[in-house]
Amino acid sequence: GVYMSKLVQSLALMSALVATPMLATANPCQNGSIEVEGYGEVLVLPDVATLGFNVKNEQKDAKVAKANVEKSVAAFIAKLEKLKLNKDAVNASEFSMYSTFEYKNSKRIFTGYQVSREVKVTVNDFALIDKVIAAAIDANITDIYGFSYDISNKAKFQEQATLKAIEDAKVKAQALAKGFNLKVTKPCSIKYGNQGGFISPQVRALQANAMDKSQGVVDYSPKKQTISSQVIVSYGFE
């Protein structure tokens, strides 16, 4: 019928569309290939620092322990507000509570409850790091488990590293071809190799109760970090 005829025509058209490129495209590596690995990297200065604080309290009564923790967190956040940080700079969502015990004469004895809440503070101005730590100390927060650096726009620099890797692959392929009196044609295989990316450097943990304000401001400036990219390309030759 008419429907079957249109269906056959549609299938024939689809087959033609699929088959035509396959017939028209020749494999540029049919006579062999030159495989190279291109590598690129960029050095980037981190522009974000995240500090981690652990606010904890242990009491016989869980409600008292929780109230003490919340009081310290509220005092800390109030002091941070004076620093005029970004809107989403403070994250205090992680909360935990568990029972504590001690052993006497091989017996397990209940001692109370420990309540803790993690507070993470992100800053773009590294000059504020020392002020954030001072605010924690003033709020009686003595467990500062360190901080890490990061880059706010890693994708941009990853792309730059990849472009360098591509150029490196082209140069290497041309050099190999020239050495064997060959001419590079089109690539027949392109894929990513190892993407080094950015590994956030961890800074050693700081104990607030061991810090002396008379030491002055500590320099928290990070060093440049490497973002790398690798591509693996097979070129045809003639």
Image (tube, rainbow, N blue to C red):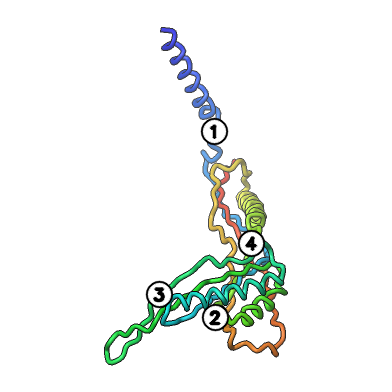
Q: Could you tell me which secondary element the residue under label 2 belongs to?
A: strand
Residue 220 image point, x, y percent: 68, 77
Residue 148 image point, x, y percent: 60, 71
Q: Amino acid at mark 4?
A: Asp
Q: Residue at x 56, y 76 (%)?
A: 71
Q: Residue at x 71, y 83 (%)?
A: 217
Q: CA distance from mark 1 to mark 2?
A: 65 Å
Q: Is residue 106 above or below residue 124?
A: below
Q: Could you tell me which secondary element the residue under label 1 belongs to?
A: loop
Disc 1 crowd rating (10 Å Cα; few below 14, some 14-19, many 20+) is: few
Marking on residue 98? 3
Q: Is residue 175 visible?
A: no
* Residue topped by disc 2: 143
Disc 2 crowd rating (10 Å Cα; few below 14, some 14-19, many 20+) is: some
Q: Amino acid at mark 3?
A: Tyr
As drawn, the residue found furthest toward the top would be 1
Q: CA distance from mark 3 to mark 2?
A: 18 Å
Q: Amino acid at mark 2?
A: Asp
Q: Of callouts 3 and 4, which one flags the residue occurring earlier in the amino acid sequence?
A: 4
* Residue topped by disc 4: 88
Marking on residue 217? none
Q: Residue at x 59, y 57 (%)?
A: 229
Q: Is residue 109 left or right of residue 221?
A: left
Q: Of callouts 3 and 2, which one flags the residue occurring earlier in the amino acid sequence?
A: 3
Disc 3 crowd rating (10 Å Cα; few below 14, some 14-19, many 20+) is: few
Q: Is residue 16 above or below residue 94?
A: above
Q: Amino acid at mark 1?
A: Ala
Q: Nearer the viewer, mark 1 or mark 2?
A: 2
* Residue topped by disc 1: 26
Q: Return the residue nearer the eye: 236 or 99.
A: 99
